[in-house]
Image (cartoon, helix red, strand yellow):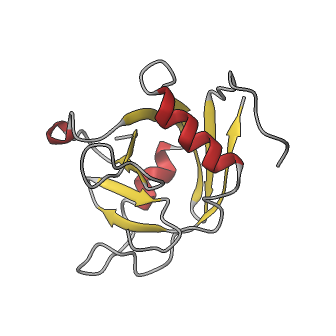
Amino acid sequence: MSGIPHDTWQPPHVLVETSMGTITVELYWLHAPVTCKNFAELARRGYYNGTKFHRLIKDFMAQGGDPTGTGAGILAMANAGPDSNGSQFFLTLAPTPWLDGKHSIFGRVSHGLGTLNRLGMVETDSQDRPLDEVQVLRAYPSG
């Protein structure tokens, strides 16, 4: 990790290396600059390294980014309501029009949809927690 990035720092991608493969997300800086900056900075600092995808729902989404583990290609921030974005993010596994206007969409999967689809096939318990751990090995800005 190098020093603090310049205010104009806007990496176009974040690579998320998981225990099932790598997912590259393109960040939507023009549409959600604050959310992109938050996500890219957390990735740059290594915040997501070693965290788990703690919630997987087939044909819906894969959620990760919560270091405590308690919490088709669209990248959005999970939240508990307006102005409550934190570190948790999710990737959609299918179109989710009912979420429009409820979550900050700030990117999309540009490479690794096969990996994302495999995440969506992981067997889960009754609370959508994976029976076999799916880990973010490393996440980092690129480009």
Q: Quadrant of the C terminus?
A: top right
Against 50, residue 86 (above or below) is above
Q: Position of residue 31 (x, y in %)?
A: 42, 21
Nearer to me, 52 or 2: 2
The x, y position of residue 82, in whole percent, is: 26, 43
Asked whether residue 133 is in view, the answer is yes
- Counting labels gives 0
Q: Quadrant of residue 49?
A: bottom right
Indicate the position of residue 112 as horizontal and vertical percent values: 54, 43
Q: Is residue 142 left or right of residue 110?
A: right
Q: Is residue 128 left or right of residue 118?
A: left
Could you say which quadrant of the image residue 119 lies in? bottom left
* Residue at x-position 26% and y-position 53%: 60
Identify the residue shown where x is 20% and y is 34%. Answer: 100
Residue at image point 61% right, 40% down: 40
Q: Residue furthest right?
A: 2
Residue 109 seen in the figure: no
Residue 4: image location, x then y, percent:
78, 39
